[in-house]
Amino acid sequence: MRCLSRHRCWSWVEPTTHCFFIRSRLRQQPRAPFKVLADSGYDDKKIEKAIADKRWNFIIALSKTRSVKSEALYLTTPTSQQWCHIDTFFRHHRRLKWDTIRLATSGNKRKRMDVRVRHTASYLRSVGKVELVCSELHNRPDGRRKYLACNDLRATAHQIVTGYRMRWAVELFHKSVKQNLGFEEVATHGFDAVIAHVHWVYCASLLLHMSPPGLSPGVQSIGDKQRALQQGLAATEKRHILQKLTQIGGVQRYKDELRQALAGI
């Protein structure tokens, strides 16, 4: 689950974390204007209510079996009746027309992706009124459909789909810091220590993306920057050794330093 604040600061929770633990952590967060993006693995009414209670906005992918109800039925039927699965809901409401929206991709070729969407304001069971979106790729009408819910009723279908697609960039970021910065290599007893470890990893990532001195602008990935920094540090040590050797009596002094270092092992 990813939380995006007004200042684009991301919070991170592993998918295997228990629902109760997530809710307890959400209650401790400040009432800042957060936007929470989550896939269907976090489609849980208690999590969604905890987010709404903080007055945050969420964009969450729903499972096909999540129960929803139209506005008309919600006003005219008992609360416990006339709910249906979201895939059945959109199948029965064929009056909702398909709209095509064009989204920019993140690749180097600057291609665009056409997505078909149907959307309407409805009620999500045990949560409340939300904007529901059914989306699919335009060139794959028989492919997998994605059902999204957003509790910000002012958001358009284009904004909801675009916001949900921002998750992928965050997934790639976490994949990168796991591979290169030891994001998962933490063994602590308390959750505060885990938070500190996560923040240190984020700081290291920010520093690497600021292009430290000595790195060429063409170096982009974190792994390449790490290797370039290691090579730069090794070159600095070699220059230091060369400077010592070229001094008067430097060879003998360097030999003495090596002997002392070996004797201390």
Image: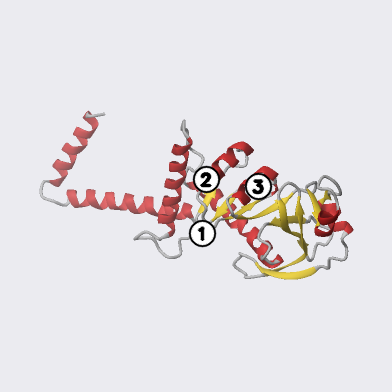
Q: Is residue 138 visible?
A: yes
Badge 1 is on which residue? 8
Q: Earlier in the sequence, mark 2 or mark 1?
A: 1
* Image spot of residue 167 (x, y percent): 61, 55
Element at badge 1?
Answer: loop
The residue where tag 3 is placed is: 49
Asked if 220 appears above or below 83 in the picture, the reply is below
Q: Amino acid at mark 1?
A: Arg
- Location of residue 19 by image quarter: top right
Q: Find disc 2 in the rendering and name its residue.
A: 178
Among the two numbered marks 1 and 3 on one chain, the one whose residue lies closer to the N terminus: 1
Q: CA distance from mark 2 to mark 1?
A: 20 Å
Locate residue 185 relative to residue 141 in the image: left or right. Answer: left
Instruction: Identify the amino acid type marked 2.
Output: Lys
Of the residues under marks 3 and 2, which one precedes in the sequence?
3
Spot occupied by residue 26 in the image (x, y as percentages of width and height):
56, 45
Determine the residue positioned at 81% across, 47% down.
Answer: 79
Mark nearer the viewer, 3 or 2: 3
- Within 10 Å of the Cα at label 3, are there few (<14), some (14-19), or many (20+) other Cα atoms? some
Spot occupied by residue 235 in the image (x, y as percentages of width and height): 31, 52
The quadrant the C terminus occupies is top left
